[in-house]
Amino acid sequence: MKLTYAGPKPLISHSGIVFDRKKEDKYRYIPFIVSLLLALDHDYTSSQNYTYTPDRKHYSDEELLRIIAAHCQNAKTEAQRRLSDKAAELDEELRRVQSALSLSAEARAVLRTNLMLMRDYRLQRTVNKSFYYSAAAALVTLVAAKRLRYIQTPFTPEYFHVFHTMEGIIRRRRLALAAQLEVYEEKGELMVRLALAGR
């Protein structure tokens, strides 16, 4: 199992394969989560503001995986479980195609071929998604443990996506923490902030 970019969500049918560009591979956001994990994982002094400037280092896929595994011990196990579940789901999907009487034999054969062509691609997206959510959960745990009041970065779609995911995890976990995502302008620059407060 490895971490590597797959691509946008495929829409597979008997008439072909197209890609939904609005459903980007979660791999795209992993370097941003890793940069936040590395930036926030240190000791803090109460009532201090800290500024971190990302070093823009390009991490290899192996380094990203190692950093995520260091912050979330069950990330690999969870990814393997999700991968097995997805493989079983894709196998069942292929079986259903064979019995799809609404399609001609030729259309079923084309759909089956298209599904098989995209199998590894879809499995890689599952692995990427699992590591993304494991890293996001580890980041939420870290932020809660450090009792941070907010995290702020320059606005990018990637940081916004990460903060939005974190906000969702905080709500689903029903932590004693409230999160509010804000986009605002500061000194002519667009910023994104995830404000955190104890309930």
Image (cartoon, helix red, strand yellow):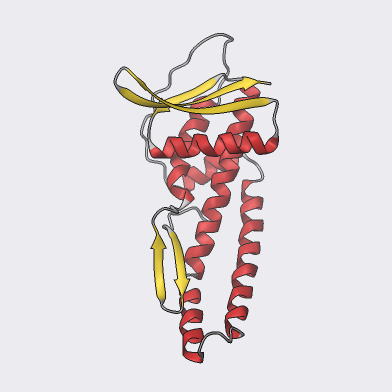
Picture residue at 43% right of the left edge, 54% below the top: 5
Q: Position of residue 145 (x, y in %)?
A: 65, 24
How many numbered discs, if any? 0
**Near-viewer residue (173 or 39):** 173
Q: Position of residue 24 (x, y in %)?
A: 43, 52
Q: Is residue 75 visible?
A: yes
Q: Position of residue 80 (x, y in %)?
A: 63, 57
Q: Is residue 70 visible?
A: no
Picture residue at 51% right of the left edge, 70% below the top: 119
Instruction: Indicate whether 169 appears above or below 124.
Output: above
**Near-viewer residue (190 or 133):** 190
Residue at far front of view: 102
Picture residue at 59% right of the left edge, 70% below the top: 90
Residue at far bottom of view: 105
Q: Position of residue 10 (x, y in %)?
A: 45, 64
Residue at far left of view: 188
Q: On the rendered image, what quadrant is the N terminus found in?
A: bottom right
Q: Is 15 placed left or right of 179 in the picture?
A: left
Instruction: Indicate whether 116 appears above or below 37.
Output: below
Q: On the rendered image, what quadrant is the C terminus found in?
A: top right
Picture residue at 51% right of the left edge, 34% below the top: 163
